[in-house]
Image: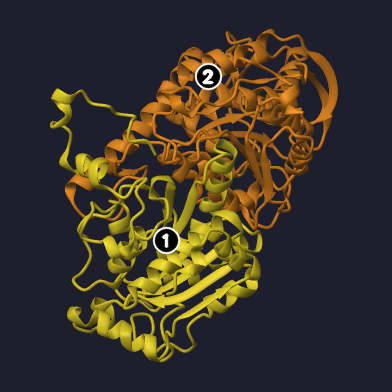
Amino acid sequence: MSKKIFTPTKEFEELLPQDYKDLVNNGPYNAPKTIDDLGSFKEITEPHPHCAGCGVSLGIRLGLASLPSPEDTIIIGTPGCSYFALSQSALNYSCTAFGNQNSVASGLKRMLSIRYPQKNKDVVVMVGDGGVADIGLDYTLHSWFRGEKITTVMLDNEVYGNTGGQESGMSPKGKVLNMAPAGKKFNKIPVFEMAKTAGCRYAVKVTVASPKKLGAAIRRAVLIAREVGPTYVQVYTPCPTNLKFSPNQTIANAKDAEKNFYVYEEYMTEEAGACLSKIGELKEKV
Amino acid sequence: MSNEQKSVGAYNLLFEAERERAFITGSEAVSEAVKRANIDMAIAYPITPQSESMHLVGDLYAQGYLKDYYRAENEFAVMAAIHGAALGGGRVFTATSGPGTLRAMEMFPVWAGSRQPVVCAFMCRGVALPPSIQPENIEMAFLLDTGMLMFHAENAQDYFDMILAAYAITEQPEVHLPVGVFADGFFVTHTREVVMLPPDNLKLDSYNSDYSPVPPFDMENPPARVTRDPLLNKSNFVSYAASASWHQEVLAAAERSRKYIDRFLGGSIEIENGDADILIIASGTAVSQSREAVKAMKLEGIDAGLIKVKSVRPFPEKEIAAATANASIILVPEFNAGGWLCREVKAAIDNNSRVVAGPRVFGGMPMPGEIIVDEVKKALAKSGGAVKR
């Protein structure tokens, strides 16, 4: 990214949109920010258009604030709830067919490596649980098998939210949902475990109730994907609208999950650990 | 090696460079075109019925003619990854056929909607209606309204020329749409014929994404909220209007491609003996069979002409209407059971009771010139001698 592509003359500077001025003067580009800085800079995301108490929008906000180089990050998505916040982010964001995200990201990352061999262009997939675990599982796994240098982030709200609360492969067993009138018959798909065997060099399971851990996971995942290979972050982002709890209970819900079925876990290969040590990232305790 | 090739303009490569004879298959003609197309990246899937073209492109990658290449897990993955690669601002190529085309279907309108200058070769095959891997071009019917430009090659020479021309046409700033270059499988891909090739030490000038009407997704832009997709799933009038006007622009871009089709394909149709009262309109290998039928009829004293349709999208409505204005019998032979070309022709001309819908062959059946002649004779008999022979 370059803030110098447009260089308005002094007299016209004030006529530029406020949004643009804020992003240029006080945005996160080329001036690394973390979630500790939230509230003190112009964020990539806008105030979110999601339901009250949305876990997905919180996951996106925390995730985008933790990118190591937002000025060189491209996000690939799918249709679904995550689209709403991501489509208005000040990054290049592409969302086309449902489930194809890791294939699109593979092609994009490779082309950017051809065109910018001297630059890090980070390609991050940021999509819901249905996009990864159901319709896109094949493409996700194959991108990991191939060792594509991309980061995959699952925003796991355990349900198809945007279409009205249908069962997803990540819904908990027994949960009564649309299309699961008698309760879901099988367990959550073990995508986190599959990531480890399918070739991810780094994988984290975390909830939005632990923003520091989430921020560190995204940052490390992107840095390792750059140097070593595919990485995966699975974020629990509960959905008050479809899982029927009060919007002010999102964090409490996630905290509860963290203690019971969504315990924090960080996995990395030796190579990934060595990469983090080399760039001084392992000093930070999370 | 790509870096030992000299970059030249498309017009030079297609029309000015001296050519030499080669005796090659259609699949090899595809690979010869790719070798000279200065492509950054190709992605392959080996489904039956695929031809050998995409593994020949893999060999070109190994020899240094492409910068990246891999085998993906299925056609939807291929077309999605090609979409991603094109988003990244480079020149890409892939190929598929028949059932593979249908599996990848969801991505074709995405390419057009996203204004990707992707070139994809289709080696048309049956689509399990009932199961068949034999040559027929019914898959073209499914692609007519995906927003892509569609060129139909008669033979290996056409296939070679049309693939290179496709890049020249689509990379015009005012076009930027995906191009499908079609050939009838087996008949063109698996048989050997003489193809005139320009030297392989020449290649197309490289693609420059600075001329794209939409920005590549490389974050080499000022801080701004950039999405290449219209406002998906926002339920309000502004979003609907944005999506509709974007779609209109895709259609308008196809219209604007016509002048470049004239320049780089030498026109969207070719006419032989166009003053005849009996005209055959065909595309793909049905053109070759029709040409044989025209020769046979001439020996019998029946005067017939031939219109070869090279560009199916955009469809040459005006050219075909003008060329058929004085014809009494218009025959449309096709290698598919659906008759998509016949429907297109009927919609483009006045008085379409003149159109004879057929003969149609499919499932791998051949189209000998005799069955075309028979159809003409039947139509002549029906006209009761009103048509000039």
**Amino acid found under the numbered disc labelled 2:** Ile
Location of residue B15 with respect to B34 vertically, above or below: above
Residue B120's x, y, as percent? 60, 38
Q: Quadrant of residue B238?
A: top left
Please state, as top left, top right, bottom left or bottom right, where the C terminus of chain A lies in the image. Answer: bottom left
- The chain carrying label 1 is A
User: Which kind of residue does numbered mark 1 sit on?
Assistant: Met
Please tell me whether mark 1 sits on a helix, a strand or a loop.
strand
Is there any visible trace of residue B104 in the rendered image? yes
- Location of the N terminus of chain A (image quadrant): top left
Q: What color does chain A have in the rendering?
A: yellow
| Corner quadrant of residue B14 | top right
- Give the side of residue B237 with respect to residue B274, left or right: left
Q: Is residue B173 above or below residue A195?
A: above
Q: Residue at x 77, y 21 (%)?
A: B200
Which residue is at the front of the view, A90 or B301?
A90
Residue A110: x percent and y percent?
59, 46
Q: Is residue B205 left or right of residue B211?
A: right
Residue at 84% across, 30% down? B192
- The total of numbered circles placed on residues is 2
The residue closer to the viewer here, B343 or B105, is: B105
> Left or right: B204 with respect to A246?
right
Q: CA distance from mark 2 to mark 1?
A: 40 Å
Shade of chain B as shown in the rendered figure: orange
Numbered circle sitting on residue B133: none
Q: How packed is label 1: few (under 14 Cα within 10 Å), some, or many (20 or more)?
A: many
Q: Which mark is residue B261?
A: 2
| Between marks 2 and 1 in the image, the one whose residue lies nearer the viewer | 1
Question: Residue at 43% across / 30% down in the picture?
Answer: B347
Q: Is residue B350 visible?
A: no
Query: Camera-side residue: B256 or A96?
Result: A96
Residue A126 is tagged as 1
